[in-house]
Amino acid sequence: MGSDTPAPRKRADAERNKLALLDAAAAAFVESGVDVAVRDIAARAGVGVGTIYRHFPTRADLIVAVYLHQIEACVEAGPALLAARPSPHAALADWIMMFVDFLTTKHGLAGALQSDDAAFQTLHGLFLERLLPVCAQLLDAATASGEITPGMDPLTLMRGVGNLCIGAENDPHYHARHMVQLVIKGLRADS
Amino acid sequence: MGSDTPAPRKRADAERNKLALLDAAAAAFVESGVDVAVRDIAARAGVGVGTIYRHFPTRADLIVAVYLHQIEACVEAGPALLAARPSPHAALADWIMMFVDFLTTKHGLAGALQSDDAAFQTLHGLFLERLLPVCAQLLDAATASGEITPGMDPLTLMRGVGNLCIGAENDPHYHARHMVQLVIKGLRADS
DNA sequence: TGGCAAACGGAACCTGGTTCCGTATCTTTG
DNA sequence: CAAAGATACGGAACCAGGTTCCGTTTGCCA
């Protein structure tokens, strides 16, 4: 195991294009949402469509690559909030709102997140793998402290919150954050 | 006004085809969801695609026509529940769960409902026009009785509940009803 | 510098929605 | 009952956007 140079060392132009694509995709996502046409991203990056598919076989791979940083920030914020906030429930509430902020500022991301299209498996998987444990930890802590009623399934909570964020950036009359607040309040154990 | 025969009396075959399309669409919706391919519906009804577009210019028109009955049932259930249930909050809770049952048994309907595609304007409009007032009435009653905290926007509530139902029929691990229960509980005025 | 594997570009392809018009059918009227 | 006009039909053609494929180019190493 642990061979010294298992990396087949990629070509320089390939690396360059990959970066260019990430830049272009990030820009295209903010401008036109995560559903922006593949050709547009390619054009913006100055490459052919084939190059996109070579580096990012599915749209989800591209989305993941673009937002990985922010997802990891959410992951790290979990334990941090748990330590910083006066109670686990407060930490959970803040963490969820952080997640909501993340989703609602990425046009269409919440929608993509819930798509059952096979191409979004990667995205789904990443959220489950990285965010779910954090959510579960916060949930467990809040349950243990008696602040919320036991039996809340982390996946249901994450998915539900994600769903509530769908379309939030389009309809000014729909207040996703308000709905999420309601959910957080509903989690509270009855006084 | 009130001319005697303002109806331009449609041709018999047209009427027949429209019915056939409604049948075919209803069957196709349960089998493959509301996103089923237009051509499939046409084939099932034994008509050409042109005939679909003639009778139902947008997919939303077809969805509306198929589910109009059940939507109206929801409309009528509002006041009925308000009269039958011990409290307005109970009536609101039951009514929302009824709405959830409706949405989660129609593959993909919840998703279509939140789409901002112009083609779904009709669907959106119908829900807003017919269901929103009912929701508002229940909400007002529950607010007036002091059971829930004031300030809940009916549109946000309806839309949020709709969003929570998205994908509920696909992922067995996601419990949409549980999330909706949480929202209903969160609506409660603090004891 | 020559040779080759890696990567590229973008035309071609596929799927699914939408339009359009020549044809068939119904209805009315003489 | 037949003819004429209106109405509706069917499905080929079109369009958009994702995906694939292969001839060509480029970078890397010997």
Image: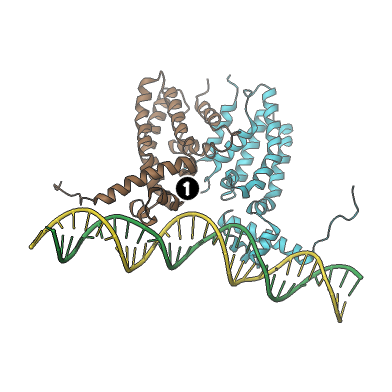
Chain colours: A cyan, B brown, C yellow, D green
Left or right of B133 on screen, residue B105:
right
Residue appearing at x 67%, y 47% in the figure? A122
| Residue D7, above or below A121 | below
Q: Amino acid at mark 1?
A: Val
Give the secondary structure at mark 1: loop
The image shows a total of numbered marks equal to: 1
Out of C6 and B155, give the one closest to the viewer: C6
A145 above or below C15?
above
Q: Residue at x 58, y 44 (%)?
A: A116
Q: Give the side of residue A8 with respect to residue A153, left or right.
A: right
* Residue corresponding to mark 1: B36
Q: Position of residue C1 (x, y in %)?
A: 86, 81
The picture places residue A14, in percent across and down from the top left corner, at 75, 64
Viewer-side residue, A39 vs B36: B36
Crowding at mark 1 (Cα within 10 Å: few <14, some 14-19, many 20+):
some
Q: Position of residue A80 (x, y in %)?
A: 74, 36
Going 47% across and 35% down the picture, which residue do you hit? B105
Q: Is residue A68 visible?
A: yes
B14 relative to D2 in the view: left or right: right
Locate residue A101: give its quadrant: top right
